[in-house]
Image (spheres, grey):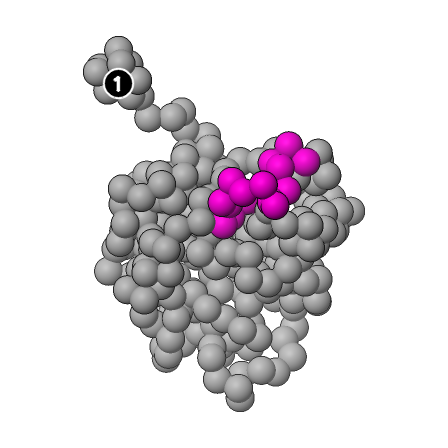
Amino acid sequence: MAKIIVINSGKGGVGKTTTAINLGACLNKLSKEVVVVDANLNTPNIGIHLGAPIVPVTLNHVLKGKADVEEAVYEHSSGTKIIPSSLSIKELTKFNTNKFANLGRKLKELYEYTIFDCAAGFGEEVISVMDIADEIIIVTNPEMPAVTDALKSVKVARDRGRNVKGVIVTRHKNAKYEMPLSSIKSMLEAPIIGVIPEDKAVKESVNKRDAVIHTHPRSKVSKKYHEIARKVAGEAEESRGFFKKLFG
């Protein structure tokens, strides 16, 4: 059954885009039909992250009725498909956000997984994207301001009858000054489905215009994103090798 997964947070800069890109890339590696949509219409970043900052047809054109959604799909060299939004200031016009519902239905006909990277906060476009989600994943950092904003995201999602799949804690340093994971789980009343460690590999992957699971496949960050993708896809953890079973 096709699913729409919305990556959300109340606060900007916590790693939503990185999570959306790498989750999509991991699901693609699991042989799933997946597309990552940049629904952050004001400050889009997916195209920048993957080396396609300026493209002829964007999500903006689709929402304005100037193009079909298939025309706005671009394939990264890794095979991951994306729908970027426009960086042009001229495109910063008000949209009929009701069109997200039609967009979601169309994408569910085409892909097993549609991942929406939406803007921070709770503006009209964010609510419109949340309303079409089958599952919402909340991204936060292990610090009180970010977790407080994540709590708002959880409450807004549940108030609108959406299923919160879980929480991903990014930039985790395992430092004493960070909020304990148990406290984050208790405060948000949602399962933590992944903890992504602080790693310079993430920034290096942005410079290389690719997902970190491709540029640094053996990093802890990559392994964690693969684990999350398997949970999202409902697949069991990869079985460990014979020697690891004996000595691991």
234, above or below 51, in the image: above
Q: In the image, residue 16 lies at what x, y percent?
A: 52, 56
Q: Residue furthest front?
A: 176
Secondary element at image label 1: helix
Q: Which residue is mark 1?
A: 244
Q: Amino acid at mark 1?
A: Lys
Q: Residue furthest left?
A: 243
**Front residue of 108 and 151:** 151
Q: In the image, residue 152 lies at what x, y percent?
A: 74, 52
Magenta segment includes 147 = no
Q: In the image, residue 224 lies at what x, y percent?
A: 41, 39
User: Is the residue marked by circle 1 packed among few (<14), some (14-19), or many (20+) residues within 10 Å?
Assistant: few
The residues colored magenta run 164-183
Residue found at x 64% / y 60%: 11
150, above or below 101, in the image: above
Tell me if I can see residue 112 in this picture: no
**Front residue of 236 and 3:** 236
**Front residue of 88 and 176:** 176
127, above or below 218, in the image: below
Magenta segment includes 175 = yes
Q: Would residue 154 appear left or right of 169 to someone viewing this image?
A: right
Residue found at x 30% / y 17%: 248
Q: Would residue 105 appear left or right of 32 to someone viewing this image?
A: right
**Front residue of 21 and 35:** 21
Residue found at x 26% / y 18%: 244
